[in-house]
Image (cartoon, grey):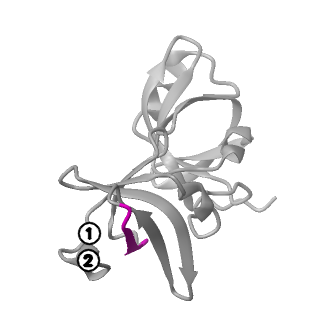
């Protein structure tokens, strides 16, 4: 297997318990294969160091707990707190362009906590993906799915918080 440590999983935020587990705050959403991972890289002094994962527990969409082979006490893993954790190239990251159907039925909320509507469909145009949003007034709004507009995605609650340019939703009326 070719290893590449360029996919940031997250950062170790604390140790957990006395058996050498660490809590990792995830940087983004990953597909379920991540929890079958066999190894990760920890960034130590700016260089990736491989570690074998003996256990991975999902806490929620933003936190996982890892135990590394050979590190079975909190003393052994305490030096890893704050380290960034990277994936090997063989694991798949959820790519919104390939898994867009997962966003259907998500609620879209603006940064001022106004409910814009619910994602009813995805329109994939060359170079632009558009969310088809149905409002509570049964209107249809088309909003570009662009990373600059997305503030937060809460997969547990199925909510996407967006910071949309002024007037964008009015264009559709």
Q: What residue sits right under mark 1 in the picture?
A: 164
For label 1, the SS is loop
Residue 25 drawn above or below residue 110? above
The image position of residue 124, as x and y in percent, is: 57, 79
Place residue 160 in its image quadrant: bottom left
Instruction: Name the front one of labels 1 and 2.
Output: 2
Crowd band around label 1 with a 10 angstrom C-alpha radius: few (<14), some (14–19), many (20+): some
> Visible in this render: residue 84?
no
- Horizontal side of residue 171 vs 120, given as left or right: left
The image position of residue 22, as x and y in percent, is: 52, 27
- Residue placed at 36% from the left, 60% from the top? 135
For label 2, the SS is helix
- Whole-Å distance between the Cαs marked 1 and 2? 7 Å
Residue 29 drawn above or below residue 99? above
Between 122 and 163, the one nearer to me in the picture: 122
Query: Residues at badges 1 and 2 in contact (C-beta under 8 Å)?
Result: yes
The mark tally for this picture is 2
- Horizontal side of residue 148 vs 73, given as left or right: left
């Amino acid at each position: 297997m070719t290893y590449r440590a360029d996919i940031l999983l997250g950062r170790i935020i604390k140790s957990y318990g006395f058996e050498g587990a660490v809590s990792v705050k995830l940087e983004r959403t990953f597909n379920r294969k991540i929890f079958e991972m066999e190894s990760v890289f920890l960034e130590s002094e700016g260089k990736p160091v491989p570690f074998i994962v003996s256990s991975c527990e999902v806490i929620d969409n933003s936190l996982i707990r890892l135990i590394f082979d050979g590190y079975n006490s909190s003393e052994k893993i305490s030096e890893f707190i704050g380290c960034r954790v990277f994936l090997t190239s063989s694991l798949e990251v959820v790519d919104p362009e390939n898994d867009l159907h997962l966003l259907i039925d998500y609620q879209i909320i603006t940064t001022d906590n106004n409910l814009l509507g619910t994602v009813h469909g995805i329109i994939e145009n060359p170079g632009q993906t558009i969310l088809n949003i149905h409002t509570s007034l049964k209107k249809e709004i088309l909003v570009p799915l662009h990373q600059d507009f997305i503030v937060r995605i809460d997969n547990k609650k199925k909510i996407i918080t967006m910071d949309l340019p002024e007037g964008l939703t009015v264009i559709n009326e």
